Image (cartoon, coloured by chain):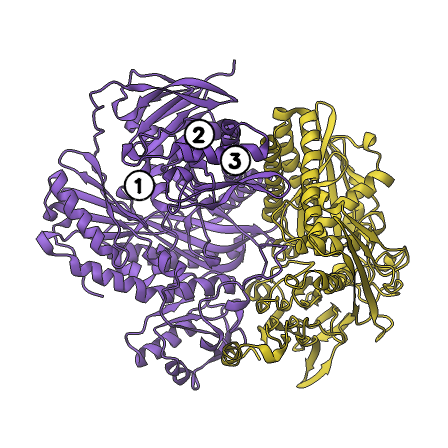
Chain colours: A purple, B yellow
């Protein structure tokens, strides 16, 4: 990888840029500390080499907003390069080395089928085929002791014969003892100095061989992909004095250096939703609302994440395309419901909405690009919630007649007038969205009434108050620039490093020395790695705990404990019982508790420049009025111009609020006002 | 109510079953529930018909309704079943399947009107009896298989029936696990009840009852349409189980005579073997679930699976047969009967819809139970349920190591077993050559080996398909049968696939080789590129 050292004075430069590279557009958010203004810019994504579009966007933004390339000190970069490489299988030729006798674990997976009734199922995805999985003569025990020492034999010759472009090493119980994996790595490196090698004991030293192996394989195969991209990006630095420090967004909602990303690219895999979740956490602080459910609705999917006590919830495992990734990630529930979701009549006369989506091509019927099946967006148009003349700020005309005809067909099949069928599509969508939000709260034992709903994404605002009503949430927040909120979240990211190690301990005094030793190792490593980034580390500790016999663990925060004593252990145990009771309605305080995995998170805080909101546009806040169909009848409602809203304006539902890239609906029984940070806050009025 | 109201309610009921499912998944204690995912949750209408279910185990899903209906008709009068009463049973002869499966039900009321039931079924790690795991392979009476809990109120008026809890505690090998899992089941019922009560506040009792009726009617209509699309006719097929573990080598015949007539189907099982001495018997609730599962999967999907789908299908199964056993026949291994019955159903359905039905999957839950006894006397139990390969489909190879048919289990991580028990797993991989050859090849079975690391261990197995292999279709070849081997002091000797409490000692290795799936179409028609790939990957 090319050197990527930023200019020595990078930290002193006034401009910070967040970039979120999506499939169609590259979104930029620019914060200039000289005036505190946050400004958004969009430029087409260049799929062949996304760094090209990135630089184009930066140059365009510099010209438009009046800063020099040499003013940019920090570039925070969200990328789907790793994600797309996996989804599209643009991956190098990998080899897996694993304990002999267990070469097929990667292919066997955990083998639970998802569609019970399918008669011709597809195999589970497997990224390294059987002839490129080699058994290693060695065996460790669960306590880390060596049962059979590592013997290389002809292994390196067999490996070389496969001409690998990346190597994954995952040996049984290596989470408890990495020495065999390291010895293997050293032996391979001596022969192939440039070959990317990923060790399971580095990337995911946690118990459960399949999940660890899957993570390690993904990491190995992504090393050449991400290194190549970073090299191309680095090569573009230097022009016009453009030499910022570059940090990449990880799945855990933090950012990391290029060096970390090059070694541990699997940490980027599920970073797509991280920007939105980061924005949610930042808004939670700005708005003084520590408990939020953030929902991001676009064309095809609805992503739900939970901010609790001001913090994003993380989980210890995610998956991509059916492949588990055992690394901390922002907890997100995704369902296939968006503006493009298709409404259909099924055999038996049932109406369904999604998960099939018309996407951008052909798109909803109203796009006039050949779509014939009505979508959620068509239902909004048919009920008057969308203005055919102001879609994307008026830059795209909608085909009202096409939508009306499609809704009439749907209505005829249901025995309903077209507008009632369209409202039915919206109601059903809202039920599905509400179920996803409720399940996200429910699985943590949380109550909707304690949360506000933060609605963003292009399509979210049209559903938010009705979804909130459905689940008993009393307040909905519509943040500024809802369509580019992810980039806004990235703008305020911090460096974050998660380390973990599995070792089974009874949670009792006799285990203290062992736990303390493991913790000291993890803390030292975390501090040392953050020091390499030039930042002091704030450490926090957590443990995966369970009752003996349980096979899944709860993640229990343990503060910043450094040298645990009896009291600290009791505190941890008490928290576990309390959390277990909160989530699962019982606690078994007399039962033995086990610690399975210990975790240390290091946070390196980046400076937080002050920001200033823009003044309202000097034009009337009410744009006009139009008819919408709601609750089985047409109503004439006011249409508000978001950019012209001032603090004095009171929006009473039913009402519509428009802005260039989003439209919001305030339902009957709700009223809304401009709140802090330019957000609109809607509240449900007391039940009459 | 509009069709939209109905769909809104149906989706909410499915979400309720999902919330119940999450509750059990996150709170249960035993590995069999937590890692093998051997449990199911469901929501029923006010008469006990299944409305919505969580997607876990086919064996359970289409049987819970029958169990609840049986309770209501024969044991607990609905008017005596209060809103705070939880009724449990595990008795196969009261609507259950086999003793380790404890069913728990609770009614849901709105303004004094019963509007629904919620139910949860867990396979418990042990309910006593002559073998650990309650999977005695050579029992000849149900009394040897464990504690039989008649339908009773475990919780009545919100108060625990402590006498029952102490009887349970006293009669099972791992009381803390069983009682912990039972607590999970009860917690999930409360979660389901609350979700349905929320819905009823909006739609009222009458609305819920109307919606329930219409949800079932819509699935019935869709199922009838799917059956009507199959050609009328009578289709017969027979498959067999190796034996009952008691009368060795005497096969048990599962014969299906399927008649499609217009929009309904009749499944006549009268020519199945009489019930057997050993535990390879099924109650009607079990057999029904295999028949319904076969018909529902062959219908091609696209509509919600619920009790409405059962209505167009009539099952004929006289009492006293292996598919409708009389008490006190033992039934622990009823899943063997339902696996094979499903194989037979698919064989018959292949004749009706040849472009849809795959060749036979391995057709067996490979249950292996190890009870280890450490130096200090501590006893631990590991119950493993292994799988094999799926059958080749008419246009596609089968899948290697794919949980198929009547069960749907996860495996237990090797590292977890070794961290918790004095056992090692010395090998876990695909079994080359075990898939049936054909134009499309059957999926491969597995090899798994366990080594005993304790001074004593008792091994119990309950397996099948060691003599009769999974069939191929349309000229495809059968898959390899299974094999169980004991490796001791360098000597290999076969272990019987149905055995109880075989004493093992430190260093002994038990090796299981499972069946693949059958092939589809003549082997000569296989694409040479696919053959070359099989060679390269060592699948054959």
Question: Residue at image x 65%, y 78%?
Answer: B507
Query: Quadrant of the image for the N terminus of chain A?
Result: bottom left
Q: Is residue A249 above or below residue B273?
A: above
* A391 on left or right of B216: left
Q: Earlier in the sequence, mark 1 or mark 3?
A: 3
User: Cα distance, mark 1 to mark 3?
Assistant: 42 Å
Q: Position of residue A557 (x, y in %)?
A: 45, 45
Judged by depth in the image, the label closer to the viewer, 1 or 3, is 3
Question: Is residue A273 among what the camera can see?
Answer: yes
Report whether mark 3 lies on the same chain as mark 2: yes
Residue, far top? A688
Closer to the chain start, of discs 2 and 1, is: 2
Residue A100: percent from the left, percent from the top?
51, 77
In the depicted structure, whether residue B175 falls above or below residue B465? above
Q: Which mark is residue A489?
A: 1
Spatial distance from mark 2 to mark 1, Cα to Cα? 34 Å
Viewer-nearest of discs 3 and 2: 3
**What residue is shown with label 3?**
A409
Q: Tell if the residue under mark 2 belongs to the same chain as the one under mark 1.
A: yes
Disc 3 to disc 2, how far (Cα)? 13 Å
Q: Residue A382: give its label.
A: 2
Give the mark toward the camera: 2 or 1.
2
Q: Is residue B433 left or right of residue B270?
A: left
Q: Is residue B330 left or right of residue B354?
A: right
Q: Quadrant of residue B163?
A: top right
Mark positioned earlier in the residue sequence (3 or 2)? 2
Q: Label 2: how many residues lie within 10 Å, few (<14), some (14-19) or many (20+)?
A: many
- Tell me, yes or no, whether dots 1 and 3 are on the same chain: yes
State the SS at label 2.
Answer: helix
Return the residue nearer the eye: B528 or A541: B528
């Amino acid at each position: 990888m090319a050197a990527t050292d930023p200019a020595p004075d990078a930290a002193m430069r006034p401009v910070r840029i967040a970039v979120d590279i999506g499939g169609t557009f590259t979104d930029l958010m620019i914060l200039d500390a000289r005036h505190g203004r946050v400004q958004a810019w969009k430029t087409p994504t260049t799929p062949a080499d996304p760094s090209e579009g990135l630089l184009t966007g930066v140059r365009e933004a510099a010209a438009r907003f009046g800063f020099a390339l040499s003013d940019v000190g920090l570039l925070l970069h969200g990328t789907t390069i790793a994600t797309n490489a996996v989804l599209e299988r643009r991956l190098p030729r990998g080899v897996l080395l694993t304990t002999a006798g267990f070469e097929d674990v990667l292919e066997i997976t955990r083998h639970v089928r998802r569609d019970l009734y399918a008669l011709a199922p597809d195999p589970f995805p497997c990224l390294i085929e059987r002839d490129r999985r080699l058994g290693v003569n060695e065996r460790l025990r669960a306590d880390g002791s060596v049962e059979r020492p590592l013997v290389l034999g002809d292994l390196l010759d067999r490996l070389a014969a496969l001409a690998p472009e990346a190597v994954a090493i995952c040996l049984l119980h290596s989470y408890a003892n990495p020495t065999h994996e390291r010895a293997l790595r050293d032996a391979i490196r001596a022969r192939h100095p440039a070959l990317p090698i990923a060790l399971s004991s580095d990337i995911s030293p946690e118990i459960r061989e399949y999940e660890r192996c899957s993570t390690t394989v993904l990491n190995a195969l992504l090393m050449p992909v991400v290194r190549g991209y970073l090299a191309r990006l680095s090569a573009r630095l230097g022009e016009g004095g453009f030499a910022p420090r570059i940090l990449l967004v990880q799945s855990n909602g933090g950012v990391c250096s290029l060096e970390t990303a090059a070694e541990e690219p699997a940490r980027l895999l599920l970073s797509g939703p991280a920007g939105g979740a980061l924005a949610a956490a930042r808004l939670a602080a700005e708005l003084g609302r520590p408990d939020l459910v953030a929902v991001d609705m676009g064309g095809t999917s609805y992503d739900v994440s939970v901010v609790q006590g001001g913090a994003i919830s993380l989980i210890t495992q995610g998956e991509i395309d059916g492949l588990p990734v055992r690394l901390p990630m922002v907890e997100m529930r995704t369902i296939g419901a968006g503006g493009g979701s298709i409404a259909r009549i099924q055999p038996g006369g049932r109406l369904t909405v999604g998960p099939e989506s018309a996407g951008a091509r052909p798109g909803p019927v109203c796009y006039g690009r050949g779509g014939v099946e009505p979508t959620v967006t068509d239902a909004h148009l048919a009920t008057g919630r969308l203005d055919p003349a102001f879609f994307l700020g008026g830059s795209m005309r909608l085909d009202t007649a096409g939508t009306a005809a499609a809704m009439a067909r749907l209505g005829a099949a249901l025995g309903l007038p077209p507008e009632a069928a369209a409202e039915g599509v919206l109601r059903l969508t809202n039920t599905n969205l509400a179920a996803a939000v409720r399940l996200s709260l429910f699985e943590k034992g949380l109550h909707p009434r304690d949360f506000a709903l933060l609605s963003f994404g292009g399509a979210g605002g049209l559903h938010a108050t009705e979804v909130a009503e459905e689940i008993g949430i009393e307040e909905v927040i519509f943040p500024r620039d809802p369509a580019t909120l992810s980039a806004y979240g990235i703008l305020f990211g911090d460096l974050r490093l998660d380390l973990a190690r599995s070792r089974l301990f009874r949670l009792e005094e006799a285990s203290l020395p062992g736990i303390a030793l493991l913790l000291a190792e993890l803390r030292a490593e975390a501090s040392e790695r953050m020091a390499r980034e030039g930042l002091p580390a704030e450490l926090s500790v957590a443990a995966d705990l369970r009752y003996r016999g349980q096979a899944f663990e709860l993640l229990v925060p343990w503060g910043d404990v450094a040298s645990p004593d009896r009291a600290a252990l009791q505190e941890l145990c008490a928290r576990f019982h309390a959390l277990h009771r909160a989530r699962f309605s019982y606690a078994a305080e007399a039962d033995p508790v086990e610690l399975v995995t210990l975790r240390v998170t290091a946070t390196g805080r980046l400076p937080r420049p002050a920001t200033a909101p823009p003044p309202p546009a000097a034009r009337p806040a009410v744009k006009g009025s139009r008819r919408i169909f709601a609750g089985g009848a047409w109503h004439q409602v006011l249409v508000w111009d978001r950019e012209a809203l001032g603090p004095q304006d009171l929006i009473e539902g039913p009402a519509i609020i428009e802005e260039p890239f989003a439209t919001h609906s305030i339902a009957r029984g709700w009223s809304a006002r401009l709140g802090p940070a330019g957000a609109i806050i809607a509240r449900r009025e007391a039940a009459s | 109510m509009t069709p939209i109201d109905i769909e809104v309610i149906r989706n909410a009921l499915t979400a309720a079953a999902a919330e119940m499912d999450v509750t059990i998944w996150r709170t249960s204690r035993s590995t069999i529930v937590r890692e093998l995912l051997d449990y199911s949750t469901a929501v029923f209408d006010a008469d006990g018909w299944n409305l919505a279910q969580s997607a876990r185990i086919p064996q359970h899903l289409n049987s819970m309704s029958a169990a609840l209906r049986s309770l209501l008709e024969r044991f607990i009068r609905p008017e005596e079943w209060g809103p705070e009463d939880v009724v449990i049973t595990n008795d196969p002869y009261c609507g259950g399947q086999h003793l380790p499966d404890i069913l728990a039900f609770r009614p849901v009321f709105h303004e004094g009107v019963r509007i629904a039931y919620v139910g949860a079924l867990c396979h418990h790690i042990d309910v006593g009896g002559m073998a650990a795991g309650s999977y005695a392979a050579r029992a000849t009476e149900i009394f040897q298989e464990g504690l039989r809990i008649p339908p009773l109120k475990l919780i009545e008026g919100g108060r625990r029936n402590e006498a029952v809890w102490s009887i349970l505690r006293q009669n099972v090998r791992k009381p803390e696990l069983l009682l912990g899992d039972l607590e999970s089941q009860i917690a999930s019922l409360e979660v389901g009840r609350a979700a349905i009560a929320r819905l009823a506040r909006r739609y009222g009792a009458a609305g819920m009852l109307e919606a329930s009726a219409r949800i079932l009617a819509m699935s019935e209509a869709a199922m009838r349409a799917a059956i009507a699309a199959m050609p009328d006719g009578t289709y017969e097929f027979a498959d067999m189980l190796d034996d009952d573990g008691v009368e060795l080598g005497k096969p048990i015949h599962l014969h299906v005579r399927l008649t499609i007539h217009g929009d309904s189907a009749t499944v006549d099982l009268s020519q199945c073997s009489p019930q057997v001495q050993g535990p390879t018997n099924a109650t009607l609730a079990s057999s029904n679930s295999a028949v319904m599962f076969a018909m529902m999967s062959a219908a091609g999907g696209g509509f919600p699976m619920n009790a409405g789908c059962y209505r167009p299908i009539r099952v004929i199964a006289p009492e006293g047969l292996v598919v409708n056993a009389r008490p006190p026949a033992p039934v622990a291994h009823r899943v063997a009967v339902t696996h094979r019955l499903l194989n037979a159903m698919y064989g018959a359905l292949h004749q009706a819809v040849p472009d849809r039905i795959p060749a036979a999957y391995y057709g067996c839950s490979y249950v292996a139970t190890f009870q280890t006894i450490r130096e200090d006397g501590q006893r631990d139990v590991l119950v493993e349920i292994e799988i094999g390969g799926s059958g080749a489909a008419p246009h596609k190879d089968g899948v290697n190591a794919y949980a198929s048919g009547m069960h749907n289990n996860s495996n237990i991580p090797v590292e977890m077993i070794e961290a918790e028990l004095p056992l090692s797993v010395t090998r876990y991989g695909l079994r080359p050559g075990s898939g049936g050859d054909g134009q499309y090849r059957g999926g491969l079975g597995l090899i798994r080996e366990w080594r005993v690391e304790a001074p004593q261990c008792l091994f119990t197995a309950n397996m099948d398909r060691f003599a009769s292999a999974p069939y191929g279709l349309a000229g495809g070849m059968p898959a390899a049968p299974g094999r169980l081997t004991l490796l001791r002091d360098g000597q290999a000797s076969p272990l019987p696939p149905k055995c109880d409490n075989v004493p093992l000692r430190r260093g002994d290795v038990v090796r299981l080789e499972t069946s693949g799936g059958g092939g589809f179409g003549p082997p000569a028609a296989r694409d040479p590129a696919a053959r070359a790939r099989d060679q390269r990957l060592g699948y054959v």
